[in-house]
Image (cartoon, coloured by chain):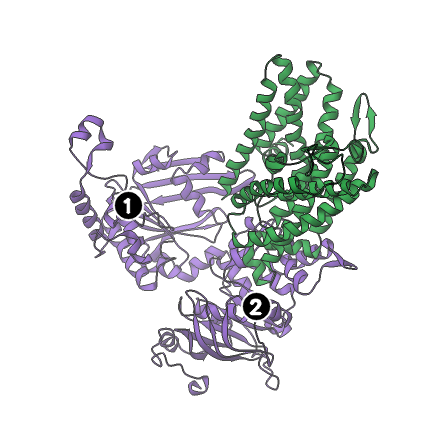
Amino acid sequence: MDTYLLEMKHITKKYGENTVLKDMELHVKPHEIHALLGENGAGKSTLMNILFGMPVIQESGGFEGEILWDGKPVQIDSPIKAMEVGIGMVHQEFMMIPGFTVAENIKLNREPLKKSVLGKVFGKNLSIVDFDQMERDARAALKQVGMDIDEKTLMGELPVGHMQFVEISREIDKKNVKLLVFDEPTAVLTESEAKVLLKIMRKLADQGIAIIFITHRLGEVMDVADHVTVFRDGELVDSMPIGETSMAEIAEMMIGRKMGAPFEKSVPVVKEDVPYAVELKDFAVDMPGEQSKGVSLQVKRGEIFGLAGLAGQGKLSIANGIMGLYPSTGKLFINGEEIHHITPQKILERKCAFVSEDRKGTGLLLDNSIEANIAIAAIKVQKKYIHKFGPFSQVDKRKARKHALEMIEALDIRCTGPAQYTRRLSGGNQQKVCVARALSLDPDILLVSEPTRGIDIGAKRLLMEYLVKLNQERGMTIIITSSELAELRSVCDRIAIIYDGKVEGILPATASDHEYGLYMMGLESGGKGRSEAEHE
Amino acid sequence: MNEKIIGGLKRFGSARLIISLFFIALLVITYVLDLSFAATVSDVLIRWCMNFLLVLAMVPSVLSGCGLNFASTLGICCGLLGGVLSLEFGFTGVMSLIMAAIFGSVFAAVIGGIYGKLLNYIKGSEMMIATYVGFAFVSLMCIVWVFLPITNDSLRLAMGGGVRLNVELSATFGEMLNNFLAVEIGGITIPVGFMLVCAAFCVLLRLFLNSRAGRLMQVAGENPKFAKALDISVNRNRILGTILSMVLSAIGILFYAQSYGFLQLYTAPLRMSFLAVAAVLIGGATTRRASIGNVVLGTLLFNGILAMSTPVANALAPDSNLAEIVRIIVSNGIIVYALTKIKREV
């Protein structure tokens, strides 16, 4: 029997009447990368908060169960205590001071000191910082994570991807660290950076540090983890060595139901004799960080059209430009009619609706109820859900509520009721509210940007299924912009790949991975763009 | 059941709870010390009504995204100007109040429109700018008061041109609303008519907030990005909210003046906006959210405490200046509390 470094036994945690963790178990050995998996809201963060002795746990009435560290019971009642024991955390948001050097950031608040007269008289706080020692330590820590960066560089000048590594260096520089928690570390990294990170995690584990790895990416788990623990709705589903399971099995455990086959849908009912639903000619949108520089494409009526591409290549700007949220040049036709001087009102009046990628900003009124969020677009654009009294009007709450209830049912929005504030909903349910609002406009054309970003598998599946259903049953033209190519390929008829602000190519969903890869990286045509006709 | 009560108390908030308890404590002390309880309660009720619209004016401003209207002083000055003109033109009785309100509202709407435009240039620091715009405007109005070509002797400064410091209202609309349908029960005078008038304004505001235009204004105030996606003009709605706030302030000061018996001109309005801000914050509003309920509760608590602390302090330490000191500590203390709350939200 191996000895465990950390054992959390029978952990139960309630927030008020709401049980978020029920009899949870977690056993972590040294040398082990232990993956924690679960849908959003499954209880992963709560368990980690307990492990770190976060004040929020004490304030909400503590928890039941016990924690064993090296076989001995410990009371972790504050983050400082957790640190003393040897638990380190790599944060999702970087906690760094941009104006300090890398070395200074790594040794922050733990600076090595030199003897000095002032220090002798007035104590430690006035001793002189030993910069040489600091840089030596920092270099050693950086080397351990395999980073070749100058420790004297200012933090603010580093690319985002590197900050994560500095953060890790800081944690392992704390000499007593025995357990490191990585909370979705790869979410902000590019693919190659993520690979390096996974390698470093492996290396650290080999050196004897236990690692708890929280992520949504199953591929990474399969690559690097030794052991996997799956949560669902605050309960332990199973915990097993990685060798005894498979990706499909884990995914199934997470959502608690079999993953269906890829979406079955009939051949799109594309009407050939009518004008294109949306046509762009040399369409350029000035959206900071996501400029498009002259996109030309046609979306047929009744089609599900995908816009793919890497981050920063401009795919997001197209839907935003069509909706008039960012200034654009070039030509836009909707159902054959050219739209001059695009404003949101003009587009909305032509029965186009938009689900923004900026869910909490453009997408939702966070301090308003679900029903208010759903109804407001129709109130503004189509003057629905209001009683009219001559020049005066009153919102028809009964009608709005009825509609909200229908949408809550149709989209399976998990909430306490239509009056709940959207701020309190989980990401997936917030997204459903956004979709519901767009649908309340009864659109012919629906633009959806990043519909599944940051939401759990169950909600993802349901949303995509619903989009397909809208397309099949109502003949709605749907344009989906997404960073997740696999998802686009499961529902779209055709996918345009945007590279460097232009259409690199338009592929059918059935094209090979290889082809998609080439287009995504802009290698197919050297960035010159290629028409669909040539491809076919 | 217990949990329900605790949940309800939590929603009520510790600050409001403490102030409510203080309010009740003052009421009890007044009763126990036999400090003409009936008269004090009557006074509290009148103060509740006389300050009501000034506090209600904060709601449209907050909901349209302009924050608490520290510049409601502008509307107040417009209301005073309306009052002066109404008297100057010789209106009497009910007409004097109605015409004052109409004149005041028109000025307030114009000034509110201009000021709203200004606010659109300084999004994010409305409340700081508002405070100083308010101060500056009061000084500007001082010049206006001095040079206003008044012909009515009861308004004119004894030495010649310009308006008096305090204009007496006993001959016109003074105490008109106070006495309107007032009922006396057990020595306590309840200004039923005045309360109904205040309630009517609540209903009107409520109707507006529930209308399409009102809903859109609140969307613009809560989330400008969201508003943009629906082509709701954020700037226009902010101006609308500011105008509404100014008009309510203008009418509010006339209500205040009729209760008080005087139109107080020159530097008198200088800090009035602060009192209204403090009251609505005590009622549970924040710089981003405010409701009519917040106004009702906040005005009662804030002005009630101000009204009762004076006689209580006098009784506890007679022959001292304690009453005045307590009044200053309470009113400024509440404003300080209010300002710290703003800080936390930003």
At label 1, the amino acid type is: Glu
Image marks 2 and 1: residues in contact by CB distance under 8 Å: no
Whether residue B215 is visible, yes or no, is yes
Q: Position of residue B282 (x, y in %)?
A: 60, 34
> B292 or A268: which is nearer to us?
B292
A11 sits to left or right of B318: left
The subunit letter for the residue under badge 1 reads A
- Which hue is chain B drawn in? green
Query: Relative to A358, does residue B164 appear above or below in the rendering?
Result: above
Q: Quadrant of residue A176?
A: top left
Query: Relative to A111, does residue A519 appear above or below in the rendering?
Result: below
Tally of marks: 2
Query: At 63% across and 71% down in the image, what residue appears?
Result: A351
- Work out which quarter of the rendered image holds the N terminus of chain A and state it: top left
Query: At 45% across and 70% down in the image, what residue appears?
Result: A315
Kindly state the secondary structure of the residue where label 2 is placed: helix
Chain the render paints purple:
A
B93 sits to left or right of B326: right
Residue linked to disc 2: A467
Residue linked to disc 1: A171
Q: Position of residue B251 (x, y in %)?
A: 72, 42
